[in-house]
Image (cartoon, rainbow, N blue to C red):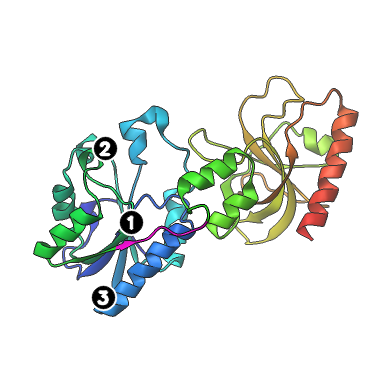
Amino acid sequence: MQIWRDVDDVPADLGRTVVSIGNFDGVHLGHAHVLREARASAERLGIDTVVAVTFDPHPMAVLRPEHAPPTLTSIRTRARLLEAAGVDAILVIGFDREIASWSPLEFIDRVLVGTLHARAVVVGSNFRFGAKAAGEVATLVGAGATRDFETVGVPLDGGPQVWSSTYVRQCLATGDVAGAAEALGRPFTVRGTVVEGDKRGREMGYPTANVPIPPVDAAPADGVYAGRLTRLDTGETYPAAISVGTNPTFDGERDRRVESYVLDRDDLELYGVEVEVAFVDRLRGMVKFEGMEALIETMHDDVRRARDLLA
């Protein structure tokens, strides 16, 4: 998998390509549908390379930062998922005000034609691009007629709800991790390095692996979930009861984090280990308990329910 971080990184001798463009945040089933069409176009045209063009940061973070959506996947995770979806190379365009000012034809000439030598461009039917989102599928069709590339506009996939990154974020915001997984085609995950916490869980018999949630990253709504924790250094996966939030029972904690208790294990040393936490289903919302006894009793029930669900 080739990852180009700038148009200048793309080899000058790159042959003809099939290009798909989008934020691809989450690489959900709708994205996979478009990318299957891109691969099919490449096979039909005898093209070896399918390139996905994505943007970092999200254009909204530059144009209207107060409305920028939380990020579902890092560029590293996005690249891994795009490769699994059939992409051969990724061009990550560093989105800024200058690029935002490019007209649709300027984007086509600089990126699609001049840099990637597109033979075909495959996008979702609602794709918009260029300054003030003035470009659409018809713009690509017209430009391709004089620039030797064809355009494929792919109907949106899903139903009754169309799969989209916005829909996945809406599911996560309500704690519907099962709905998010349906749209993604896999469980939603959070990756990070385990940090040392306050060790209250260990004192209660439930040691947890704590992963901070950066403010710009998406995460499920505060609550308790059943899921799985995977060590990325060894690949070992364990069933887990997972808490997301700030621990309202204890005063003074404000930073959101993911705390995973690996079921029936108190012997794991995970500090400093990079892990991936996958969310399978929601057990309950976050509650502020009046005392430790009520909290521990509820945690017993959380673990029992997580074990039954994951079995």
Dot 3: element: loop
Q: Is residue 297 above or below residue 37?
A: above
In which quadrant of the rendered image does the C terminus lie?
bottom right
Q: Which residue is mark 2?
A: 96
Q: Nearer the viewer, mark 1 or mark 3?
A: 1
Residue drawn at x 48%, y 56% as measured from the top left: 28
The image position of residue 294, as x and y in percent, is 88, 30
Residue drawn at x 23%, y 67% as measured from the top left: 120
Q: Is residue 207 left or right of residue 98?
A: right
Q: Which residue is mark 1?
A: 125
Q: CA distance from mark 2 to mark 3?
A: 31 Å
Nearer-the-camera pick, 8 or 97: 97
Q: Residue furthest front?
A: 160
Q: Amino acid at mark 1?
A: Ser
- Which numbered disc, 1 or 3, marks the residue that appears first in the sequence? 3
- Which numbered disc, 1 or 2, marks the residue that appears first in the sequence? 2
Local packing at callout 2 (Cα closer than 10 Å; few below 14, some 14-19, many 20+) is some
Q: Which residue is mark 3?
A: 47
- Residue stretch in magenta: 153-159
- Which numbered disc, 2 or 3, marks the residue that appears first in the sequence? 3
Local packing at callout 1 (Cα closer than 10 Å; few below 14, some 14-19, many 20+) is some
Q: Amino acid at mark 2?
A: Asp
Residue drawn at x 44%, y 54% as measured from the top left: 78
